[in-house]
Amino acid sequence: MERLEVKNLNHSFGFTEVLRDINFTLKKGQVLSVVGPSGGGKTTLLHLCANLLDVEEGNVTNSFVSTSFAFQDARLLPWKNVIDNISLGLLAKGMSKAKSIIESKEIALRFGLEENDFDKFPKDLSGGMRQRVSFARALVVKPSLLFLDEPFSALDIGLKKELQTILIDKIDKKEISILFITHDLMEAIRLSDEILLLKSDPGHIVKKFSYDLAQKERDDKYVYNESAKILQDEEIISTFELALK
Amino acid sequence: MKFALKILKDFPAYLWSGWGAIASIFLFIAVWDMGNQIYGDLVLPSPIETFKTLSLMLQDKDVLTEINITLYRASLGFAFSLVIGSALGLLAGFFITASMMSRPIVTILVGMPPIAWIVLAMIWFGMGDETVIFTVIVASFPIMFVGALQGTRTLDGDLKDMAKSFKLPWHMKFFDVYFPHIFSYLFPAWVSGLGMAWKIVIMAELLATSDGIGASLAVARSQLDTPTALSIVVIMIVSLMFIEYIILEPIKREVELWRD
């Protein structure tokens, strides 16, 4: 069975301890999110899991057959047009140029891009468009594990919902597992099976929350209710420093 | 191949956009003619006379040989500094220690006046090809070096992470992620290196050799032959403009289409 296992993970940058004793397991088909305040080591944790940073202490074992990463900013190659940006991951996997372009066009249309956008360079796209391209690039490779680094944080609510719906659809079909970091609790509640709360200085996991209802069944009311509930939690209050001073 | 075709396809439109430039050149020639009317033929020959002398010179076999000699020296020196400067700059850019160490050396090289190099080269190599070529190399090398160095140093760490996350194989990393960025620094450096090489070759020839356009310029000066001197200047300027605007600029436009 494919899984991502993190055991006794510690990490420091120089003398600053960023993460301490992180343990969790992400199984196939699961959506796990890590929430916490900004600057709390979330991105470091994600980069360690995605092998973008070298693990210094502890273990990260990833047995998923394929992974991809959607970043907070789009990170498109400025000298490549929309389609060439999307097809990057396919070409890296060794797919032929012609076939990768066909697949990229297909997914671009599904992500709300239009035919006359295909030849545009990133500089000519709006922020939302760029994020669509970035999402398309991450999903076109059909990853069995997707890393998401606050990819919705800069988007308007319409586009946010649209992209989340695409993800929920994939989650429902058990096509994808997701490790997701965010500071937006509602977003986490909408998408996750399990939420890990990461408290900072140094980053360590203080609490887990589980949600059993299938993502597709979660309506706005459910999300608002659960958000209200979670906001009463003492650990959440102290981690996000919500208490009135 | 596709790229070359695109450049050719866009070329007529590019040429058509050159009317403004041509108008300004004519304006310049008009001012030149005014200078001739004020100061007389000896100080500043009229454009007509200059162009007549020029066309006579271009029919002369000896003059063409001189031009060829100069072209040979300039292109050899330019090619050398392009290859060495770009390669060393790239190499230095990939290692922090090397780029830190090379910084002051480059400042020395850039700050050293070319005329000083010519004097040194004349002592080292005597009067001839080597002196000229050496001067061209040392004068345009730092420009290429700095271009390559900056291109490599400013590679975007975020894009590197992105490339890593998609497990791009090394050739894709190089050609799709690193190269376009580095090239956008290298290419302008090559263009200004070329301009530098062309100026320096004339100066070095004027002082250190008995053949080439630079030497012809020295002869024209000693004979107070102002029309010939001006014609030589025109040859130098027109050839540089041809290379820059007809060959390099269209390429640059295509290459930098993605820029803001």
Image (cartoon, rainbow, N blue to C red):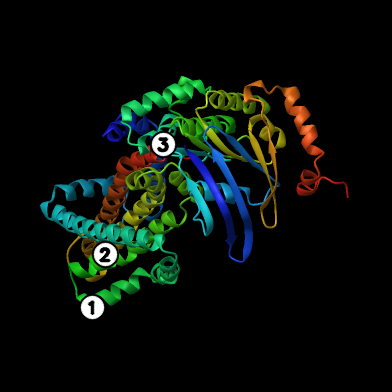
| Horizontal side of residue A159 vs A239, given as left or right | left
Give the residue at mark 1.
B124
Give the residue at mark 3.
A89
Q: How would you rate the neighbour count of disc 3 (Cα within 10 Å): few for under 14, some for 14-19, many for 20 or more?
A: many
- Mark 1–mark 3 Cα distance, whole angstroms, equals 56 Å
| Horizontal side of residue A160 vs B111, given as left or right | right
Chain letter, disc 2 residue: B
Sequence order check, earlier mark of 1 and 2: 1
Chain letter, disc 3 residue: A
Q: Residue at x 61, y 66 (%)?
A: A15
Tell me the mark number nearer the camera, choosing from 3 and 2: 3
Give the residue at mark 2.
B221
Type of amino acid under label 3:
Gly
Query: Can residue A176 be spotted in the picture?
Result: yes
Above or below residue B240? Residue A107 is above
In which image quadrant can residue A190 be found?
A: top right
Q: Secondary structure at mark 3?
A: helix
Q: Secondary structure at mark 1?
A: helix
Q: Secondary structure at mark 2?
A: helix
Q: Are marks 1 and 3 on the same chain?
A: no
User: Are the two marked residues, 1 and 3, in contact with CB atoms closer than 8 angstroms?
Assistant: no
Q: Residue at x 59, y 58 (%)?
A: A10
Q: How would you rate the neighbour count of disc 1 (Cα within 10 Å): few for under 14, some for 14-19, many for 20 or more?
A: few
User: Are the two marked residues, 1 and 2, in contact with CB atoms closer than 8 angstroms?
Assistant: no
